[in-house]
């Protein structure tokens, strides 16, 4: 990877210069780590931070939107070009708290589109964008989730829990309790059978998100968190039981809260025998 100081310098020189976008594009694609199993998260984070300020120019705005809206046909999975919309969506999340109302509405649309993207990295970018918004103020991310929750599909619900399973957002008890309540509603809807997921892939993606995110919430607020896991451990729904088991197996719970984990596992064992 090119020297970080050099990259920072080039960002400053190129980001707001339309004539230099080609050079910036080529640099990001070269340093993207794509094709490969893990995209260059450090570089995308540094890129996003360049836009975390209130003085975004019209050129900056045009530039980010042009990249954020690159489709899979233009920037396919595991292609270095996929790194461009990935970075742009993260950057728009970093800018959101400084944006004017009209810009915020446009950013909301871009993030929601990314939540539903067929490219899994773009779905990750949507969650990371929400995390940046939440770091600037939990009320901001809560406002968005509250607006989107009703009628949210499986991919969107997964983005909610993935974004919130971010320890910097869980420093306040009230924030964690909100996350637990949201997760409980999602789990209840899954178990009720009343919510029809668009397809099996949506359900699989949501389930995978819940299989780790609940443990982050529980570790932050164990009393309320283990009560929630205990509730779903008593479910007769095998999907609920799988999600609970997966979270209990996470080291953030199994190492620090061994007694509580054992109690919930006991409930699981009893339920599976009946």
Image (tube, rainbow, N blue to C red):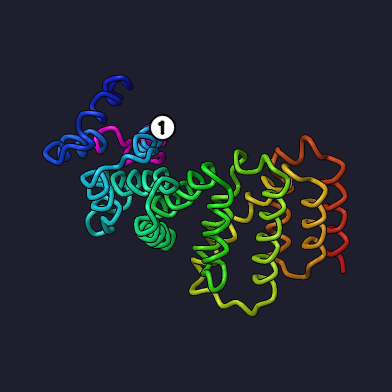
Magenta: main secondary structure: loop
Vertical comparison of 118 with 82: above or below: below
Q: Position of residue 194 (x, y in %)?
A: 64, 80
Vertical comparison of 2 with 59: above or below: above
- Left or right relative to 183: residue 45: left
Q: Position of residue 128 (x, y in %)?
A: 47, 46
Q: Which residue is mark 1?
A: 42
- Quarter of the C terminus within the rendering: bottom right
Instruction: Give SS at disc 1.
Output: helix
Q: Residues within 10 Å of mark 1 (few under 14, many from 20)?
A: few
Give the magenta-colored segment's residue range: 29-43
Q: Quadrant of residue 237?
A: bottom right
- Left or right relative to 8: residue 203: right
Q: Residue at x 59, y 55 (%)?
A: 161
Q: Position of residue 38 (x, y in %)?
A: 41, 39
Q: Residue at x 53, y 52 (%)?
A: 140
């Amino acid at each position: 990877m090119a020297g970080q100081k050099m990259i920072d310098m080039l960002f400053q020189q190129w980001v707001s210069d339309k004539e230099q976008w080609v050079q910036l594009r080529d640099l990001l694609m070269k340093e993207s780590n794509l094709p490969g199993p893990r995209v260059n998260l450090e570089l995308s984070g540094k890129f996003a931070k360049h836009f975390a300020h209130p003085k975004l120019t019209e050129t900056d705005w045009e530039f980010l939107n042009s990249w954020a809206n690159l489709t899979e046909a233009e920037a396919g999975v595991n292609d270095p070009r996929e790194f461009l919309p990935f970075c742009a969506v993260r950057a728009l999340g970093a800018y959101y708290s400084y944006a004017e109302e009209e810009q915020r509405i446009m950013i909301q649309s871009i993030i929601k589109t990314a939540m539903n993207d067929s490219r899994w990295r773009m779905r990750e970018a949507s969650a990371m964008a929400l995390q940046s918004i939440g770091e600037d103020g939990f009320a901001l991310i809560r406002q968005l989730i509250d607006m989107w929750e009703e009628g949210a599909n499986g991919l969107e619900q997964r983005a909610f829990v993935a974004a919130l399973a971010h320890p910097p957002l869980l420093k306040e008890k009230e924030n964690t309790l909100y996350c637990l309540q949201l997760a409980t509603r999602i789990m209840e809807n899954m178990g009720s059978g009343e919510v029809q997921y668009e397809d099996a892939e949506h359900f699989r993606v949501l389930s995978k998100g819940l299989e780790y995110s609940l443990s982050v919430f529980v570790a932050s607020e164990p009393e309320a968190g283990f009560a929630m896991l205990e509730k779903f451990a008593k479910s007769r729904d095998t999907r609920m039981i799988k999600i609970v088991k997966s979270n209990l197996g996470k080291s953030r719970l199994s190492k620090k809260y061994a007694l509580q984990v054992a109690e919930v596992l006991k409930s699981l064992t009893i339920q599976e025998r009946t």
